[in-house]
Image: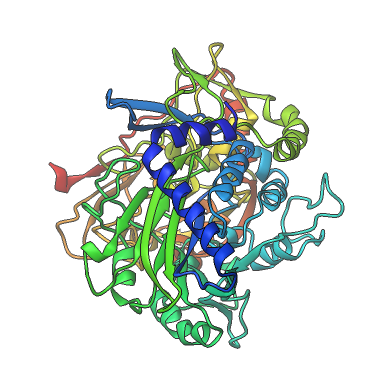
Amino acid sequence: MSAAAAGGAAARRWPLAFAAASALAAVALLAGCASPTARPTHIDIGLIAFNDLHGHLEPPRMALQVAAPDGSGQARVPAGGAAYMASAIAHLKTLHKHHAVVAAGDMVGASPLVSALFLDEPTIEAVNRMGIDFNAVGNHEFDKGWRELLRLKNGGCEKHTVREPCQLNPTFPGTNFGLLAANTSHDDGRPLLPPTGIKRFTEGGVTVSVGFIGLTLRGTPAMVAPAGVAGLRFADEADTVNALIPGLRAQWADVIVVMVHEGGETETALGETSCKGLSGDILPILERLDPAVDVVVSGHTHRSYLCDYGTVNPAHPLLLTSAGQYGTHVTDISLRVDTATRRVVRKTARQVIVQGEGFTSGPTTFAVDQRFPIFARDEGVHAIVERYRAAAEPQAQRPAGRLTGPVSREPAASLETSMGNLIADAQLLAAQGPGLNAQISFMNPGGVRGVLVPGTDGQVRYGQMFTAQPFGNSLMVQSFTGGQVKAILEQQFASGTNTAQSPRVLSVSKGFTYRYDLRLPAGQRVSGVTLNGQPLRADAVYRVVVSSFLATGGDNFTVFTQGVDGLGAGQDLDALEAYFTASGGAVVPPATDRIVRLDLH
């Protein structure tokens, strides 16, 4: 079924709404004939929104669980793929005479091989073709540093990373849409990127203007390599928005839309319009926003929700949305603006699943579901994706090792993961060369982006490894005292956004063990630290290997910056592949028994 056909199916499902709209259009047309200067009483505007695409150009092999429209229970709908997403957006544009397409960050970064191998240039080229208006930068837009972010915006081939830019496109153009970063500035106050944008819509001689404010979460510096955001400041989200609204009003903005790369979660099912169980870091931001804000398009948490926040707090009657992750669905927002008061008088939203093709995972096949719209692929976007996929394919399919079974990144009770432990073991092995002599390795959970599932022959491909560890960090070996190592462990629960309520537990290498108890006071939660069965001595010196991200204080682990006698130990992904090679056979997935959490016992 084509996108147009999907629209027809949708129309058949809502015949009364379609007929009513047709009747209104007919009345409007007759009125126009009778009085050419008649002023419309309202103007309808559509916003099409998405977030956290993360360079997923190919279908991500995900099936979304959603209530079947015929009331027959739950359906699993295959979703995603940039070519299908482009068609979904194009179709939604046809439903709104006046429209804007916006995104709430992490469009790039932590991307699969097809995009990441080429520094996310493929994603920028694909989204350029979709015809969007604005993207608010997220924390992952800073993964390669702010200079590389500006290159993605402005185009060109200046090199800022270990990977080569412009490998396939020597005239890489940069974005044709606006990148907004309202709360990010240089230390001297100069904005890194524009803070706002405006789009104007005219009908019957009346113009309505929509002001857009885009910003990332204030905690971005703790989530990326410090070197990549050196010299930048990240201001409070709500304070930034509130300060910009008068300026937008002065430019005749009637509607205020905020795209912020911060989010929450709810207890609602996909597509359900409810704020039930809304929680997360977005809440304190919403509570402090100027009531003039009409819509907040959010992201970061990879959750899907549609929330009329006025039902939570009538003082803030805004619409809050988020469209999950990886382009699996987009949010279709409808606003009605009264032309006399120039205020939004009605706002609604729905989630539109980007269904294009089915897939098979293990013994299960997820076929396209005819009960939901099915979008044809956009051939222009498909050509871009295919060009880069073909270039990446030899590298992606190269055999890189063998496994006896899948390696999961599902946290154990201790919050360590098998995938994190595997990476920590690989880093430790890579740092055994002359002068390195690493004894301990740590891996941060945010750096683990995928799992490893062997084929039927036990084979693991390089593309799988890349997806699991896509950042291209270098490894650093430094010396720390045992006291500093314990301080690092304590920072998992008490440093910046690392708290007892939201801990950030590092996976550790084989031979290193400890216990923790979150019931105890900060600084006293870690105990029983041992290395190869021997207690860690506070005054002894140990060689520790971590990624360059952690070594420079990423994820609030500031004690890592105190290391001495540092030496490089190669690239993280090279270390992972070398670990498989050195095994001489199939690698056994590590157990998650290196850390013990006492407060659950």
Would you say 236 lies left or right of 458 here? Answer: left
Does residue 299 appear to the left or right of 154 in the view shown? left
Q: How many marks?
A: 0
- Snapshot quadrant of residue 70: top left
Q: Is residue 579 left or right of residue 382?
A: left
- Near-viewer residue (363 or 293): 293
- Vertical arrangement, residue 227 with respect to residue 334, above or below: below
Location of residue 15 in the rendering, given as x and y in whole percent from the top left corner: 40, 37
Q: Residue 384, can we see it?
A: yes
* 134 versus 21 height, above or below: below
Please, which residue is most extreme toward the front here? 34
Residue plotted at (19% across, 55% down): 518
Q: Nearer the viewer, residue 102 or 281?
A: 102
The answer to which image quadrant residue 540 occupies is bottom left
Answer with left or right where residue 477 lies relative to residue 443: right
Please name whichever residue, 223 or 84, is drawn nearer the observer in this view of the structure. 84
- What residue do we see at 50% from left, 58% from top? 47
Q: Quadrant of residue 430?
A: top right
Q: Residue at x 58, y 48 (%)?
A: 94
In the rendered image, residue 349, in percent from the top left (x then y), is placed at 39, 52
Q: How is the image coloured?
A: rainbow
